Structure formats: C-alpha cells, structure tokens
Amino acid sequence: MRIAVALGAGGARGYAHIGVLQVLEERGFDIVGIAGSSMGALVGALHAAGKLAAYAEWVCTIGQRDVLRLLDPKLGAPGAIRGDKVMDEVRKLLDGVRIEQLPVPFTAVATDLRAGRAVWFQHGPVDVAVRASIAVPTAITPVMVDGRLLADGGLMEPLPMAPTTCMPADAVVAVSLPLKAARTSSRHGANVWESAGPQLGRWRVDRGSAAPRSADRVTTGDGGPTADASAETLTPDDGRDAALPADLRALDVMSLSIEAVRDLLIRYRLAAHPPDLLIQVPTQDVRMLDFHRAAEMIEVGRRAATEALESSPLA
C-alpha cells in the first residue's frame, strides 16, 4: 500500500518518528510522501533523502554531555540555542540536496512569525527548510529566509495533515507526539481520539467533518459540568497556591505552554483532514531537549506503530 505520512512536532520526542518509519517499511508499506513539522521535518527529510539509518546510528551514540556541546548555547541571542553544530551534522548527511531532487515528495512546515501563518517548503535546499522548521521559540534561534522571520512549524501546524492531501497515496498515516499518553482507535473513514486527562472527554472525527463535534458534558472534581470538552472547572480548596515542583525549569514551562496550544490545533487539523491511521506515541517522560535518549524513543515509536497497526485495517 502506498502511504503518505505526516510527522508531528515534539522536540527530542520526535526520535520516535524513526521507530515508526522503520516499522512501516518493515510491514511493506511504500512511503510515497512525507510532511513534517519541527522534529518531524528533520526526521522526514532524512528519510526522504535515504539517510535516516545513518542519522539514527549517530544519534544513538550521543550522551548527555555530547548534547550540551552540540546544542551550542548562546547567551543574549533570540533563542537559548543556535543549533549550528547539530545542523552541521545533518548537512553532512543531506549533502546539499534540494527538496525537488528527493526521491520521495517532501514538505517541511515552518511559521512566519511576522505574518502569523504557516509556510510550506516544497522546493529549495532541504537543510534550510529543516533549520527553519525546528526553531522552537525561545529555545532555538529563528532564521531569516527571503526576508521572512521563520520559526518552528509546530506553532501553526503541529501535525501537518494538509500537505498530505496532494500526495499520490492510497492512505494517510499521521504520527502525533502528545505530551501525555492517549489511547487511539483508527479505521477507514473515522478516527477516535481520547485524551489522557481523566476529565477531558472524547472527541470523534468522521471523514469530511468541518470541525470537531462537542463531546458529552464533563463532570469535574467539584461536581460541575463544563460545556466544552476541552475545558474543566476548578475550585481551589483554600485559595492559596501550593509550592511549585522542585524540578520545574523555565524550558519546561515553555514546553508545556506550547503543548497546550498544539493539542488544540491538532484536533482541528485532524477534523479538517482525518488520517486513515493515527499513531499517538506516549512520550510524557521525555523533555523537549532530552536528545540523549534517542535509542529509547526509537523503541517507543516502534512499539506504538506495531500496536496501532495490529488493530488497523491497513495492516
């Protein structure tokens, strides 16, 4: 079966995409198109260029000290990390290839910060497209391309479904990296998404739907229902704030904030363009910059893909 694959954003959690792609190919699927945002763009580009195996071998040798060296922190810059050293390694593998030269059609998604809209890269140098797509705000410095200030594609299209609609595929497989584990069930014509949160309800998408339908009312801890399945009410016990978690870092707060918005955007992207198979990879224990955990995340991706395919008519 010819499939198009949409690879979502997620920082270091995006290593799971490698494991998913490995399993898809082992099962005999012909990947005829890839769209990616952020880490999904990096992994997708390397796969389209036939260099993903070499990249996976390299990242699995990286330790925590190596990550600190490769991230190349820069004080006073519009991002804590320049990422030049990481991109140097990626450029060596890509060897100057252009998107239109790739044997597999590929789209990388970035965000034009000034225009407030998504930008699709479907022509031009692959490394330029990838560098723009992975520029997580405040973490990795943005880039200027043709007068545009570009940053992480996950800001606008955390799961880039729209580019897959013009790819010559029999089916579309989407790979999402939610911060919290979620249970999914997918089949031809419909997908069901259930939040990991105990009180966020269930959301169902039928192919051709214009927007997600409202779920049943949700009863929260204080007994009050909410009209919106994406929200819940909260009544503090005594009005006083508890102490913050001891290991909470500024980058964690930023990551959690971005994830909250991404989750909502993904719901609407899936409503407009539902895939034939949605693979959600549980990655709650991995932080955005845990790039030393590649081998672990690749295996997590393999398990998630295998489990999803076992219950899918695509298998």
Image: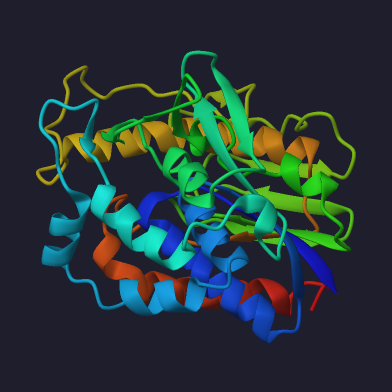
Of 247 and 75, nearer the camera is 75
Quadrant of residue 76 within the rendered picture? top left
Quadrant of residue 37 within the rendered picture? top right
The answer to whether residue 34 is left or right of residue 156 is right
**Residue at left 48%, top 21%?**
148
In this rendering, does residue 22 appear at all? Answer: yes
Of 89 and 160, nearer the camera is 89
Of 269 and 79, nearer the camera is 79
Quadrant of residue 230 within the rendered picture? top right
Q: Tell me the quarter of the image containing the C terminus.
A: bottom right
The percent coordinates of residue 103 (x first, y second) are 70, 66
Furthest residue toward front:
96
**Residue at left 79%, top 65%?**
3
The percent coordinates of residue 149 (x first, y second) are 43, 22
**Residue at left 87%, top 57%?**
168
| Residue 71 against residue 81 in the figure, above or below | below
Q: Tell me the quarter of the image containing the N terminus.
A: bottom right
The percent coordinates of residue 11 (x first, y second) are 38, 50
**Residue at left 29%, top 22%?**
236
Furthest residue toward top:
114
| Residue 131 against residue 54 in the figure, above or below | above
The answer to whether residue 162 is left or right of residue 130 is right
The percent coordinates of residue 261 (x first, y second) are 49, 30
The answer to whether residue 250 is left or right of residue 174 is left
